[in-house]
Image (tube, rainbow, N blue to C red):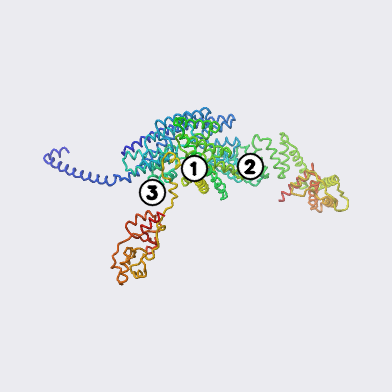
Amino acid sequence: MLTISLLIALILFLITGAVARGYHEKLHALAGQWFQAAQNDLNAGKTAAALTDLRNALAYEPTDPRIQFRLAQALIADGRDDEARSYLEGLLAHSPSDAEVNLELARIAAKSGNERDALRYYHGAIYGVWPDHPRQDRLNTRLELCRFLLARNDDAGADGELIALQSDLPGKNATPLHEQTAELFLKAGDARRALAEFRVVLNSPHAPAAAWKGAGKAAFTLGYFAAAEHYLQIATRLHQSNPEIAAELQSSRLVQQWDPYLRGLTAPEKWARTRHVFLAATARLKTCAKSSGIQLSAPRRPVQGKTKASPNAEAASASNGEANTANPLDLVALYQKARTLQPQLADWNLRGHPETIDAAMNLVFAIESATAQTCGQPAGLDAALLVLRKTMQSRER
Amino acid sequence: MSEIAGGLPAEIPPLAEALRGSNKKKRTRIERLWTVWRRKTLTLREGQLFFLLAIVIGLLSGSVVVCFRVTIEWVRFWLLGPSIAPSPLRVVLAPTLAGIGVALLVIYLFKRSRGSGVNQTKAAVFIYDGYVSFRTVIGKFITCALSIGSGQSLGPEDPSLQMGAGIASVLGRSLRLSKEKQRLLAPIGAAAGLAAAFNAPISATIFVIEEIIGTWSGGVLGAVILAAVSSVVVMREFLGSAPMFRVPAVVFHKPTELIGYAVLGCISGVAGLAFLKFVAYFRPKLKKLPRWTQFVQPASAGLLIGIIGIWLPQIMGSGYPVIDQVLHDQFVWKTLLLLGLVKIVATGISFVSGTPGGMFAPTLFIGAALGGAVGGFEHLVFHQPASAIPEFALVGMGTFFAAFLRVPITSVFMVVEVSQHYTLIVPTIIANMIAYFISRRYQKVPLFDFLARQDGFFLPSLEEMREQTTLRVEDAMRSSAGIVFREDNLRLLLEQTEVKNGAQILLWKSDGGWVVAAREEAQQVALNGASAANLSTKGPVPQLYPDQHLDEALRVIGDWPLVPVVNRANLEKVEGVLSLDDILHKYRS
């Protein structure tokens, strides 16, 4: 009887096998149909219908990662990040190195402001397994990570990622990637690497106009005023100009025209430039004091009340981390110093005391800085002198 | 060869004959050896046969359950269509029409298909010597596939359990096993059926032990495990090895979260209690209605569920895909709360109407929905960084299971096994126990017991059995003072002036072991200064230990007037003595 039972079990086994096979084929077919319907709905922009289709498909193939991933993407498109995250985390538990899943999770975490998780998932995506174009996808993901870090004001973090990305950039036929990288370097405050990347872009046969502008800005930030003028001129010619670019271009020209520290100048040229910028700064000081109602020649006394600064000046000083307004006494003191120093700028004195140029320029920079705080951002040569001051400070650092 | 044969013609016949004789002897000896070896090794004793049978039961039950689940799905495709959100017309018509068919089948063909499979299996074990008819198996298969596939809010696990028990019973009868073994086969089949339905051999084994057998007998346990495992192997072979529910990465961050899970335990306990009261109240009411109403009760239940299903199609059928969605955070907490409450009503309606089908899957559905609702609410109120719905839904499944079905151990293992996640074991245990105790506090009789009583069976309540106080030897023994003496120190007996401690004494012999002697004789021997060797004693007397069960002591004590109760670490140290009167006195008190 036991033998008969075993025989019956075997027959039942075979029947069950046939039934199960038919069942799986049916499920597979249904899942495929619903998945296809979902794709069509998604292509037609019908996200809600696509969600229902994908849920139907998932009911028939609950373990199919392709359906789960598509459903998660559809949920994200529908703004239901929490629901999508649940599926994505399930997928990640089964396949931790799946780069696409990591990327979607990173985006959800980034959207919800969870920086730690976002970084973890972005790195998971960068070092994970991509199905089709791994190199391109990794670079794009790292660019996305850099944008995320910059949006979170993590310039140092973004710069580190960009340096890593830079080493992976392909040499040829990757102008857009180099351009994006350069732009991001610039935003991260790494003008040197930004300029290098822009130069790679500019060396390509069809360099985009925006690259000239970017290169100009990078060169300007680095204090390479000749190069900045060259790039910005071309950018202006290619209709890339705006008031900021125009101001930078003008500043670049003026700095080159009047910078007494420029290499290759003769001594008389240096003296002449020093005197010119000194007189310009003194004139700015007088104008500023007059507009602010400060008596520069009056004897020193405590000033009642505050001197009002322009909103631009406040913003500028705040951005420099300085006091909102310069003390009026400073302007008076600076004026007194200028009056004392002015006679020493004669050729005969400068010949014997070349260090007077440094003293004069320091005073010029102090005047421009103080007047910028009191009377707002200057234009023309005064603005160029402020740029020169900033460049020299950064060079000293 | 021909030359040799031709050259020695006269010698060949006797040689051949001798060779034939020798071969015959050899063959006989080999046959004898083979027979002996076969008898020794291949002939199965009943115990071995029992284990082999458990495997066969597992294989058969697994196959039947696979076919059953596939049939449910096919019925669903035919009646409701391939979408998880079918058209309203189908939603209303399918369960209604199927309800009429089910009623006719149950009334005219398969009378025993109605009711709880767990109770029918228990009845088979305790009343019918393990008998479950094959007709019941077929009836359960057809009627449950029709009702569940058409969208009635019932599950396939309970019928699978009964089908497994039925297959085991049929096999047992065919093999003409003893009544005792046949009685044991039904729960073995039940475990196999449930294991295949749940893809959870451990939970099925524990459930059968906890709810059907009630004891951890070594022999049965082995067979139950074998059957459960072999049925799951078959199920996984045909339907895949993925766990029943795909649970996303769930985490248990910090102990303060346990407060939330404790709240979930309270809510599930109350909800489980409400569900129990619903079934306990309406089932007998509907049973008392005129007989003709039984023809329309399943159809009416189907109609009601269909109407609900137009707005909430998720509550139809077993609801496994919806549980998957709940675990993947696809609903907001208000929807989950609504789904949980409506599912209680829908399942209650389906079950009390007498539609065949089980309550395990709906119980999990309700638990997941209520758990998810609590998790979602907590997320909303306490502004947790990530949604806690999957975690609470998973724990909620076990919690409601514990509160409603009153199987606390199974509920914990089931959560772990069906999800293949161990992370939430601590919250699950805590929440389940809270829910279980709330349910037990306000509903004394568990679900399966009151269902059995409503059907006219007075099956043993295993929950009550588990909680019965066990009397031990230490509860009945009395002091050994004046009764126990050492053989070499018999003089101490003379200090006993009154014979109030009985006519017998116990003596510890110098060479070890206990004997019993008459007190008067011993006193006389001691008075004469004679050796204890002169005493007429009876022994060796068996000994007992304080922790032994009293019924065990009853078997040990036999005709002995006194038995010493000794310390397990020191057999010479007497903790007390026990007599038959002491035992009876304890049982009477």
Residue A268 can be seen, yes or no: no
Element at badge 3? Answer: loop
Dot 2: within a 10 Å radius of its alpha carbon, few (fewer than 14), some, or many (20 or more) residues?
A: many
Query: Foreground mark, 2 or 3?
Result: 3
How many numbered marks have been drawn onto this rendered protein structure? 3
Q: Which residue is mark 3?
A: B217
Pinpoint residue B143: horizontal percent, then vertical percent: 43, 32
* Front one among B256 and B582: B582
Q: Which residue is mark 2?
A: A148
Instruction: Specify whether A151 is left or right of B156.
Output: right
* Front one among B564 and B336: B564
Residue B48 can be seen, yes or no: yes
Dot 1: within a 10 Å radius of its alpha carbon, few (fewer than 14), some, or many (20 or more) residues?
A: many
Q: CA distance from mark 2 to mark 1?
A: 50 Å
Do the residues marked 3 and 1 share a common chain? yes
Instruction: Specify whether A154 is left or right of B304.
Output: right
The answer to whether the residue labelled 2 contacts the one labelled 3, judged by CB atoms less than 8 Å apart, is no
Q: Residue at x 40, y 63 (%)?
A: B479
Element at badge 1? Answer: helix
Q: Which residue is mark 1?
A: B404
